[in-house]
Image: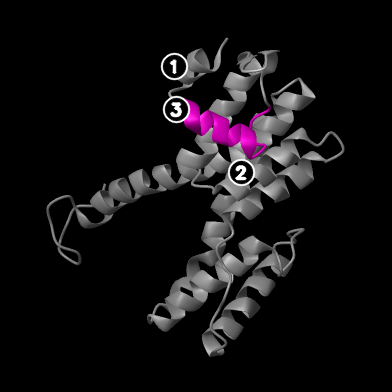
Amino acid sequence: MRIGELSRRTGVPVPTIKYYVREGLLPPGELTSPNQATYDEKHERRLRLIRTLLDVGGLKVAEISEVLAAIDDPERSLHKVFGATAEGFGTAHSEHDDAESVAAHAVVADLVSRRGWRAHASDPAAADLSKALAALDRLGHGAFVDVLDAYADAAEQVARADLEYVDRQVVVEDMVEAVAIGTVLGEAVFSALRRLAHVDASAKLYGADGPPGGDCPRT
């Protein structure tokens, strides 16, 4: 197909497709003349993946480039692909150097150790968790750490579900792509499910019409 047809099928403007090719996100088409190239279903699939990582996953172009490089590297293990994809979600850069940050780092290190997780305190996810806990503490919600293990239990269950989905793939290339897609879109899916569950749990706990703390029926 020509680039115009690729654009029509995916909804991605032609200039944007050309930009992705220049940035190395999308392989160039096969030249049929000095000014013409053709594209196939692999280009369409890769383009849809790029747009999904960008629009749904919220990754930046540079982060998408890292994820795609991990997918395309035949020497990289599935575990390392998970790591490369997860790093795209890292948001903790500069942190406050205060008592709350120190305490939060200690809480996270203890959590990882107690649960026997094969992770490091220096991992981006651990840094993000520490940053969030420190912020909660500064806002007067330091007691949130009391429910941290419940969150960890849910996270382990979701992580197992992610890996079970990856294991359903037969072709190695599909497994690698499933790791990236499952990590990025799984994050969006779990966030949306959590919000839906909040609505349901709130209605059951506080009553759909009654104020918190009132005599509301619990079902």
Residue furthest right in the image = 75
Secondary structure mostly taken by the magenta-highlighted segment of the chain: helix
> Is 85 above or below relative to 129?
above
> Which residue is identified by label 3?
13
Task: Look at the numbered disc 2 and give the secondary structure of its residue.
Answer: helix
Q: Is residue 167 visible?
A: no
Question: How far apart are labels 3 and 2 at the CA level?
Answer: 18 Å
Residue 197 lies, in percent from the top left, at 36, 46
Q: Nearer the viewer, residue 11 or 129?
A: 11
Question: How far apart are labels 2 and 1 at the CA level?
Answer: 23 Å
> Which residue is identified by label 2?
64
Of the 4 image quadrants, the one containing the N terminus is top right
Q: Residue at x 61, y 49 (%)?
A: 62
Give the amino acid at mark 2. Ile
> Is 86 above or below relative to 140?
above
Q: Earlier in the sequence, mark 3 or mark 2?
A: 3
Region rendered in magenta:
13-27
Q: Nearer the viewer, residue 141 or 188?
A: 188
Where, by quadrant of the figure, is residue 104 drawn?
bottom right
Tell me if 128 is positioned left or right of 10 in this view.
right
